[in-house]
Image: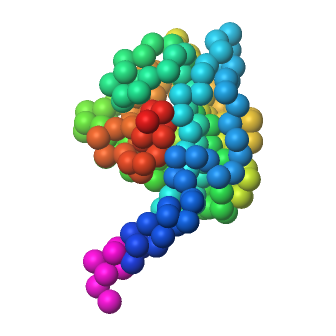
Amino acid sequence: MTSLDLRRRAFGALLLLLSAGASIAEPAGKRFEPTAKVEDATLLLNGAGTRYRAIFKVYDMAMYTPRKVSTAQELLALPGPKRLDFVALRDVNSTDIGLAFVQGMRANATPEQTTRYLTATSRLIEIFSSRPKLLAGQDFGMQFVPGKGTTFFIQGEAQGAPVADAEFFNMVLNIWVGPSPADPLLKDALLGQ
């Protein structure tokens, strides 16, 4: 069987799931709150969805912003704090998640940006590599606060001091909303489409 045949079968299975009522745009696990607090700011749930890899659910994800946006351009230009919340839907190797995030950032960034944020990117890998697995049901996240940077969380606990600036957090956002998103259907869900 060729790789094209395998992809066709996976796509067929995905269509079967969708026709049976499974929704990619609607998180299957944890329901996310309509607002989230980041320091003194109350952010709105901009969108939420489930990340699929082939036909397997990997995590539910929510994006919080100061006001609702519907395009990646609006999101990346939006000033103020932002937050991403995730819930693992299966046991996953933590290092694999960290590396997938880095690959997603590189796929949507210039070589200059990748070089400029090498230290912050290394910190992301360190955080996820510090534990062997994320178990189904565990949560993780990241938030950006202007003037402070990006803080990573696992199980609600900050993983060290904030890193980098708004440009770095936009690189992180581009993993899901950039020109080469991790999952195009999840991109639409996060942007409320």
Judging depth in this view, the residue of 83 and 116 nearest the camera is 83
**Magenta region, mostly helix, strand or loop?**
helix
Q: Is residue 101 left or right of residue 50?
A: left
User: Residue, x 68% and y 36% (percent of image)?
Assistant: 32
Residue 36 shown in magenta: no
Examine the rendering and report whether any part of residue 126 can be seen. Answer: no
Residue 151 is situated, as x and y percent measured from the top left of the image, at: 60, 29
Q: Residue furthest left?
A: 111
Q: Is residue 41 left or right of residue 20?
A: right
Q: Quadrant of the N terminus?
A: bottom left
- Which image quadrant for residue 155? top right
Name the residue: 52% across, 52% down: 24
**What stretch of residues is rendered in magenta?**
1-8
Looking at the image, residue 159 lies above or below residue 65: below
- Across and down, in percent, residue 127 comes to 61, 44
In the displayed structure, would residue 179 be above or below residue 13?
above
Front in this rendered view, residue 71 or 146: 71
Q: What's the colour scheme?
A: rainbow
Taking the spot 67% from the left edge, 23% from the top edge, the residue there is 35
Estimate the x, y position of residue 125 in percent, counting from the top left: 52, 47
| Residue 19 left/right relative to 134 | left
Number of numbered discs overlaid on the protein picture: 0
In percent of the image, x 62 and y 61: which residue is there?
A: 92
